[in-house]
Amino acid sequence: MDETLDEPPTSAVFLDNCHFSQVIFNNVEKFYIPGGDITCFYTLTQHITPRRKDWVGIFRVGWKTTREYYTFMWAPFPSDLSGDSIVQQQIQFRAYYLPKDDEYYQFCYVDEEGVVRGASVPFQFRAETEDDILVVTTQGEVEEIEQQNKDLVKENKELKESCLCLQKQNLGLQEELRLAQEKMKELEGEVCFLQTGNLELRRAQELQAGEMNSAQMNLASIREQNIKLGKENQELQKGLESLRSSCEKLELEGNFLKEETKRLTEQNGCRESELQQFKEHNQEVSSEKEQLESRLKTTLDHMDQLQSQVLNQEKEMENLLRMDHDKTEQLEHLKEENRQLRITLAEQKEQEEKLEQCLEDLKHQNHDITKELEEKNHLFQLLQRKKDEIEEKNLRLRQENNELLMRLSESPDYSARVAVPSAQVPTRSPESADLLFGNPYYNSLETSAVNMPPVKKCPLCHEVFSDDIAPRQYEDHVRSHILDCPFCDETFEDKQVYDDHVYCHSLE
């Protein structure tokens, strides 16, 4: 498996904080046959930005945090990735690292922050059977849950539409308020300009009043100009008052718009509180599903699937509709299967009783065989002693025979007395080639060789043991070749497979 030495990024993020609709898993089978590699297909939507440390894990159904993965693979980084594109990806899990039990599992896409971005429907690792039945719950409960989900989806759509309308109205009012503020700023600039002009006129009037003392000849003209300036000043004051009144109106309109915005914000808050209530109601529905899971162990996978229906409505609704057509037949099959299981259980009990009886018989037979082996071992020891005695006698006879030959060779009439036809000389066996008249115990030695006890051979290292070895000692020798995993109950005969298995535990 293409893994690095560091562990995948995980976190204590719970199911409520995950976003399961950002990655969609495709073509997920109900079960996979053990012993083979599996390929996981998934789609990256435009709502997720993939990163280098994202990974896809296999989780047992019922997990609470992302630290509870069984195995994982690093997610391949897309080669062609744009902002709003949907990318199809696939990843392959090796058969050796897959679960070996028949529990329910699911694929989960986890980003580099340890947050789950997508989850698949549950599946199993088991062989294909004709009666592949997954019992979920009763028909009434399924219809009630479907109706509640439909009502929640409808209310959620209505709330979203009303929220969008309020947001549009709020944006329009904010735009009007911005325009009114800009217009008010322009009017304030004009008022400032008029005030500066009024100040200049006042200064000019003061200058004219100073010049009036020095130039009495021009008093008439100055008075006329003063009257004109007074009229213009009055007109400017009237314009200023009108501008002030318009500015006050704009301020009132701005205050009204602010109050309207505040009222809309409060309505939006009420809508959010209603949405929160609906979410709490949805959480209560999820808790009811968890209670159903505790009563029916086989419904864990579908209850988790119902929990993810709230976030992935279309896919879960299709699954529920497909399952709805088969509910009656599944219940009938369940009753039939329950009846067959009871019959099978009774038969298994009978078989267990028979096996226990056979085990007792085998124990008695083993005890008898052990006694026979002990007797044979004792007999073998007696025969070995007899064999040693016979060899000692044979050695003494050889020595006596050699002495007789020496004496006969020294006598002068040796050739006349020992003239015997060659046909009458007994044929010597290869084992007694150095004896004159052969070995009289040759046949008994052959018989003892035939009666030699068999031997035992180790099936792993092929070491040979005598048959009189204790069964416990022989079993200890064979068991010394078997490697036990220090983390689980599995045993191995191959050292390489054992090392890979222990390394897999070290990654957890």
Image: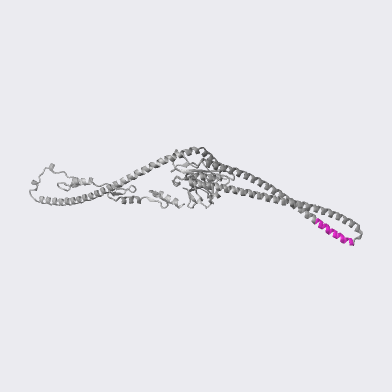
Residue furthest out toward the right: 217
Q: Is residue 83 left or right of residue 416?
A: right
For the magenta stretch, what is the residue range?
Answer: 196-213
Q: How is the image coloured?
A: one colour
Residue 414, image x, y percentages: 9, 48
Residue 434, image x, y percentages: 17, 48
Residue 56, image x, y percentages: 51, 47
Principal secondary structure, stretch drawn in magenta: helix
Image-quadrant location for residue 348:
top left
Residue 479, image x, y percentages: 35, 50
User: Relative to the observer, which residue lies in front, 444 or 397?
Assistant: 444
At a point 87% along the width and 60% down the height, the residue shown is 209
Does 206 lie within the magenta span? yes
Does 391 lie within the magenta span? no
Q: Is residue 159 visible?
A: yes
User: Relative to the observer, which residue lies in front, 128 or 280?
Assistant: 280
